[in-house]
Amino acid sequence: MDILLTDGLRPFSMLAGFILVLLAVEIALLLIGTSSAVELDAGPGDAGAMMHDAAGAVEGAGLSPAEMATLDVSRADTTVPLVPARPSAMRRIMRLIGIGNGPLLVSLTGMAAGVAAVGYFGQLVLVGVTGAMLPGGVALALAVVPGLLLGGRLSALIGRLVPAFESHGISGQVYHGRRGLVVIGTARRGEPVQVRWRDTYGTTHSLMAEPLRDGDAIGEGTEVLIVKTRARQPRIVALDAA
């Protein structure tokens, strides 16, 4: 213990204690059914981020003013950020050091463990070669960059062992303005059919919907635009007929 608390190793011993605290907190969170997970896959400020413009999709479907008047356009769900085609430089750096690959506390644990491991190893090698260690502050500064890179790898390994309780939650109304595919049957008014569509995160969903127009018959395999009425009911419009 005296060796671990010497000036050259004290910063890294403190990081080791910090690791134990972080792991204890994360385990406690998992026991109550939650986690410190963070998502960094999307963000409205990222360059190249794609946006789902529901209003633009609906306006481009060629609906008449009377048909447009039946739709619910009051909700502010017309623009939803999607996974950016090219993450920003800051997000790539955060991914590199392990933040955003899983629970935040696990990422911090990996970062602390990486810096501590590099610091311990460097100081012990140095004392074996020269008989002396660097001052703790100097050793810590030199260990930060390689330690964070190592911590990113450790975070990814630890994250795989942590049960993933979290999932993407979306509103049941965000199908408005999205494209879908009729997978079973022919849709007529009063005869809804199954329509398959994908949400912001690429997850496939199914819903039952009937045509927006009274006289339409939309057959299996038809690509459709899904819209939401003022009564919060899904309706579909065949894109080849729009």
Image (tube, grey):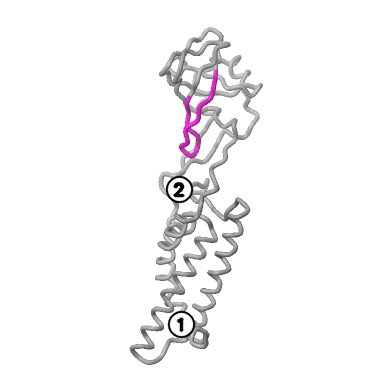
Q: Does dot 2 land on a helix, a strand or a loop?
A: loop
- The extreme bottom residue here reads 131
- The extreme top residue here reads 215
> For residue 172, what is the image quadrant?
top right
Give yes or no for residue 197 being in the magenta stretch.
Answer: yes
Residue nearest the observer in this picture, 52 or 34 = 34
Decide which of tag 2 and tag 1 comes sooner along the chain: 2
Q: Which amino acid does label 1 sit on?
A: Val
Which label number is shown at residue 233? Answer: none
Give yes or no for residue 142 being in the magenta stretch.
Answer: no
Q: Does dot 1 land on a helix, a strand or a loop?
A: helix
Residue 233 lies, in percent from the top left, at 61, 22
Q: What residue type is labelled 2?
A: Ala
Q: How crowded is mark 2: few (under 14 residues within 10 Å), some or many (20 or more)?
A: few
Q: How crowded is mark 1: few (under 14 residues within 10 Å), some or many (20 or more)?
A: few
Label 1 near label 2: C-beta < 8 Å? no
Residue 222 lies, in percent from the top left, at 42, 18
Which label number is shown at residue 47? Answer: 2
> Where is 41 relative to 228, above or below?
below
Residue at image position (47%, 32%) is 204
Residue 195 lies, in percent from the top left, at 49, 23
Region of the chain picked out in magenta, as a range: 196-209
Residue at image position (54%, 77%) is 14
Residue nearest the observer in this picture, 180 or 26 = 26
Per the model, the C-alpha gap separating discs 2 and 1 is 37 Å
Residue at image position (55%, 36%) is 79
**Is the magenta region chiefly helix, strand or loop?**
strand
Residue 19 lies, in percent from the top left, at 53, 69
Return the residue at label 1. 138
Residue at image position (44%, 81%) is 139
Task: Count the marks.
Answer: 2
Residue nearest the observer in this picture, 65 or 163 = 163
